[in-house]
Image: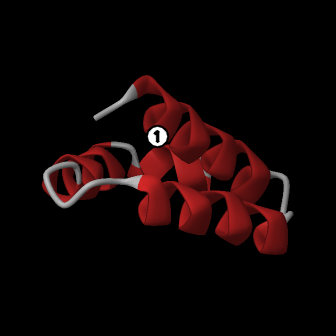
């Protein structure tokens, strides 16, 4: 996945932990829309691997 997509997902996770859910969703949606079809599986795996980034739990 391109670095810009990963950075957007990381920002979305930070915003989620700060309870800024509307902003988090907007950032994530923008990343999903810019992603190519080839990137979608990698994004899905990143989200699975980084669930705790969004919840703040280990």
Q: Secondary structure at mark 1?
A: helix
Q: Is residue 47 left or right of residue 22?
A: left
Whether residue 57 is visible here, answered yes or no, is no
Q: Residues within 10 Å of mark 1 (few under 14, many from 20)?
A: many
Q: Residue furthest top?
A: 3
Q: Residue 42: where, in percent of width, then height?
A: 19, 46
Q: Residue 14: where, in percent of width, then height?
A: 71, 43
Q: How is the image coloured?
A: secondary structure
Q: How many marks?
A: 1
Q: Is residue 50 left or right of residue 1?
A: right
Q: At x 68% / y 57%, what residue is drawn?
A: 27
Residue 3 picture quarter: top left
Q: Is residue 6 left or right of residue 14?
A: left
Instruction: Tell me: residue 48, above or below residue 11.
Output: below
Toward the viewer: 25 or 34? 34
Q: At x 29% / y 44%, what residue is drawn?
A: 46
Toward the viewer: 56 or 42? 42
Residue with the mark numbered 1? 5
Q: Residue 33: where, in percent of width, then height?
A: 46, 66
Q: Residue 49: where, in percent of width, then height?
A: 27, 44
Residue 23 picture quarter: bottom right
- For the N terminus, the quadrant is top left
Residue 25 picture quarter: bottom right
């Amino acid at each position: 996945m391109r670095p810009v997509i990963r950075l957007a997902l990381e920002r979305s996770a930070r915003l989620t932990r700060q309870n800024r859910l509307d902003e988090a969703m907007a950032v994530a949606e923008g990343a999903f829309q810019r992603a190519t079809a080839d990137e979608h599986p990698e994004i899905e795996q990143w989200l699975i691997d980084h669930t705790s980034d969004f919840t703040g739990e280990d």
